[in-house]
Amino acid sequence: MPAVKPKKFLGQHFLKDLEIARRIADTLDEFEGVPVIEVGPGMGVLTQFLIEKNKELTVVELDKESVPYLHEHYPALHGRIIEADFLKLELPDIYKDQFCVIGNYPYNISSQIFFKILDYRNHVPCCSGMLQKEVAERIAAPPGSKTYGILSVLLQAWYNVEYLFTVSEKVFDPPPKVKSAVVKLVRNGRQTLSCDEKLFKTVVKTGFNQRRKTLRNSMKPLLGKECDAFNDPIFGERPERLSVADFEKLTNIVAANLPGRDREKK
């Protein structure tokens, strides 16, 4: 069967460098015995190394051309190829308990993939793989960095993030217009936030929606223009200066000062 042609509308850039594929597969070595879901295997350049490691592996592939190719070239995947959109799957339907997620992630949905991992964080002890360098930097950025943002805070609340290495655009077919990078996320020990989780997400997103403004200005949609809490020094900061713990503190302040809260108490 001929090679699969990369499709622009699926964000496909097929990795050609086998050594890089091996290094990506190695990121899961410490999670021996934990099943693996690979996202977008394409022609199986990463898949082959996961099979070599005897991982219990299920692959999720949307490309109708890639699926028969995988069936033909990787008989070990028999019954383990799901032809579907990863973003629409209920992942515990594949593995009920713990599972790792890995992939050479399609550029056009990589952020959405990591947001989905957050929804299943108690099932996913490790998520690793390759994505565009800009998004990888955002995920791994520390507070105070220009690239620190919504994705950084929400992921770092639940995962220890490691930026592993940068990948040249020349090792792909077709070469993307940007460099790529490999990241590894390992679940931290946090079980709950010290604030309301839904409001935490809202506060983080609201803060970074106007990242150049102080939180005193960006939080006005939530707290109104004349909130007494604005006297707290935290509201004089810009969102990129706040750690996860700072955002938890901010969320609790916002929760205590939401308009209508006094009426609710009565």
Image (cartoon, grey):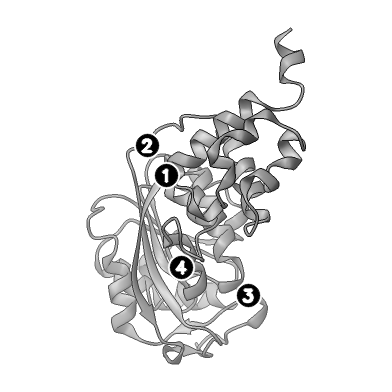
Between tags 3 and 4, which lies in front?
4
First reached walking from the N terminus: tag 3 or tag 1: 3
> Vertical placement of 169 versus 163: above or below?
below
Q: Quadrant of residue 163?
A: bottom left
First reached walking from the N terminus: tag 3 or tag 2: 3
First reached walking from the N terminus: tag 1 or tag 4: 4
Q: Marks 1 and 2: CB-CB under 8 Å?
A: yes
Q: Position of residue 125 (x, y in %)?
A: 35, 47
Please give the name of the residue rendered at 43% of the width and 39% of the height, measured from the top-left corner.
245
For disc 4, the marked residue is 136
Separation of marks 3 and 4 at Cα, in angstroms = 19 Å
Q: Position of residue 143 (x, y in %)?
A: 44, 55
For disc 1, the marked residue is 158
For disc 3, the marked residue is 10
Please give the name of the residue rendered at 52% of the width and 55% of the height, measured from the top-left corner.
240
Inspect the image, locate mark 2, and give the three-letter code of the amino acid beneath it: Arg
Query: Circle 1 sits in a helix, a strand or a loop, which is it?
Result: loop
For disc 2, the marked residue is 190
Q: Quadrant of residue 164?
A: bottom left
Separation of marks 1 and 4 at Cα, in angstroms = 16 Å
Q: Is residue 26 left or right of residue 129?
A: left
Please give the name of the residue rendered at 68% of the width and 42% of the height, measured from the top-left corner.
219
